[in-house]
Image (cartoon, rainbow, N blue to C red):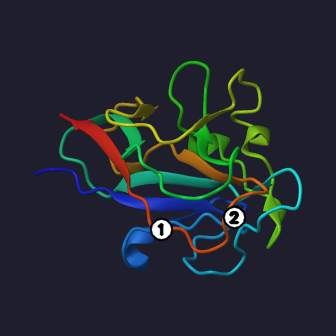
Amino acid sequence: MPVTPYIEVWHGAGPTETNVEALGPPNVRLKTNDDATIDLVDPVPIPAAGFNYSYWKHIAIAWDTIPTSLTNIRHYSDAAIGWNYGTSGELRRGNRDAGDHGCPKGSYDQATGTPGTTGDDLETHTYYAGQTTKTAALPEVTPGVVIDSTDYSAAEDSHAVVLQVKVDTDAVQGDQANETMTWLYDEI
């Protein structure tokens, strides 16, 4: 019997783990607020100068049962992020110089910033701040980067990919199109 994973977002001080699939389709909205709500409240405004950022989002896969073993968890996109976030804007993820790129729950760092204005730069996240290359731009394509190489054999959740959108002054205003991100893992 194969594993049935679901997507969860970690947010708040705890963190609180929200199964976003229980809210409907497994969507995540990048905005200037630290919650798992899919709405148009607190969008990322286009800055007059410099950059504005969404609050970073910790996104993990989780499972309630596992028949044998699950490992080598990877994350990627289709290589065609169609968002208009401006010339030097980007969708990016937290990056480690070596090893897994995912953030373990024990290293969770709550997103902060000014709701409705900007989040703090992902490069200040405590798990990534000491790295030489603190963030990497998406899109990445299959087979993706290793988020978590742990060998799991019980109900749990993986390390989280940590995503953030960076918006430049010449971005185009408006709700951006949905983009698909994919998780891969080895099930033994």
SS assignment at label 2: loop
Q: Amino acid at mark 1?
A: Ala
Tell me if mark 1 has few (under 14), some (14-19) or many (20+) residues whose alpha carbon lies within 10 angstroms of its own: few
Comparing labels 1 and 2, the label whose residue is closer to the camera: 1
Q: Which residue is mark 2?
A: 12
Q: Nearer the viewer, residue 57 or 53?
A: 53
Q: Residue at x 38, y 70 (%)?
A: 21
Q: CA–CA distance between discs 1 and 2?
A: 26 Å
Position of residue 6 in the picture relative to residue 96 (left or right): left
Q: Amino acid at mark 2?
A: Gly
Residue 176 in the image: above or below residue 170:
below
In the drawing, what numbered circle is on residue 177?
A: 1
Q: Is residue 46 above or below residue 111?
A: below
Left or right, 183 with respect to 44, comes to left
Foreground residue, 62 or 37?
A: 37
Q: Specify the quadrant of the image occupied by residue 84.
A: bottom right
In the rendered image, residue 97, in percent from the top left (x then y), is placed at 61, 20
Q: Could you tell me residue 91's position as x and y percent?
A: 59, 48
**Tag of residue 169:** none
Vertically, is 108 above or below 133? below
Which residue is at the far right? 49
